[in-house]
Image (cartoon, rainbow, N blue to C red):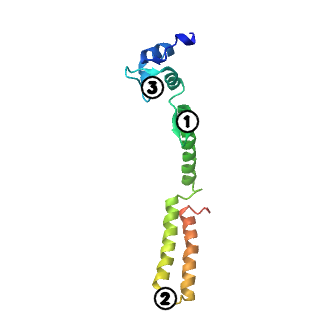
Amino acid sequence: MAQASLPEQVTVNWLSECSGMHPNTVKRRTTDLPRDARGKFKRIPALQAIYRGTITQLNGEFVSTPEAVRRLTIAKKEEIELEMEIKRGLRIPIDTVKEVVGRAFMSVAATIKANRDKVLTEAQINEMFAMLRDSGEKLISKNGGQHI
């Protein structure tokens, strides 16, 4: 077809006929495109939406649907790998780390607050450091005996 014979505004039926796709497929792929008062689309964005997918904006960067699917696949693969590392005991879940470290710091804070305006004894100081050292051992024991 010559450039002059192509319409600037097109319908779902025209897109379906030209692309050979079912009208429902064309409707689904063009749902986010703006339409004029008669329900027609601009030809070029409509054809791009049918063949390449709608273009969305992510962090100021235009991403096509196939690229978004590719990125999602990579992210899911990384998530599965991380979950398998946790299940094998190669990593400790962050919630476990936060819990153990939080307990250690709460114990140290309680000792310091209880002795406010007093001199800490060597035994109290050693107890606080022992608690911090033990938190690492607790993480290792919660990780199935494997070092972090």
Q: Nearer the viewer, residue 16 or 56?
A: 56
Q: Which mark is residue 131?
A: none
* Residues at marks 2 and 3 touching, judged by CB atoms closer than 8 Å: no
Circle 3 packing at 10 Å, graded few (<14), some (14-19), many (20+), is: many
**N-term-proximal mark, 1 vs 3:** 3
Which residue: 53% across, 40% down?
58
Marks 2 and 1 close (CB-CB < 8 Å): no
Name the one closer to the observer, 109 or 107.
109
**Horizontal and vertical percent position of residue 91:** 58, 57
Could you say whether the residue bearing mark 3 is in a helix, strand or loop?
Answer: loop
- Mark 2 crowd level (few <14, some 14–19, many ≥20, 10 Å Cα): few
User: What secondary structure is found at the residue carrying circle 2?
Assistant: loop
The residue that mark 3 highlights is: 30
Marking on residue 117: 2
The residue positioned farthest toward the left in the image shown: 37
Disc 1 marks which amino acid? Val
Mark 2 vs mark 3, CA separation in Å: 71 Å
Amino acid bearing label 2:
Asp
The residue under the point 55% across, 32% down is: 66
- The x, y position of residue 38, in whole percent, is 37, 19
Question: Is 131 placed above or below 117 here?
Answer: above
Q: Residue 2 in the image: state x and y as whole percent.
A: 57, 10
Which amino acid type is marked by label 3?
A: Thr
**Residue at numbered disc 1:** 63
The residues tagged by marks 1 and 3 sit, at their Cα atoms, a distance apart of 16 Å
Q: Residue at x 54, y 39 (%)?
A: 72
Question: How far is the residue under mark 2 from the one under mark 1?
Answer: 60 Å
Screen quadrant of the C terminus: bottom right
Q: Position of residue 123 (x, y in %)?
A: 55, 87
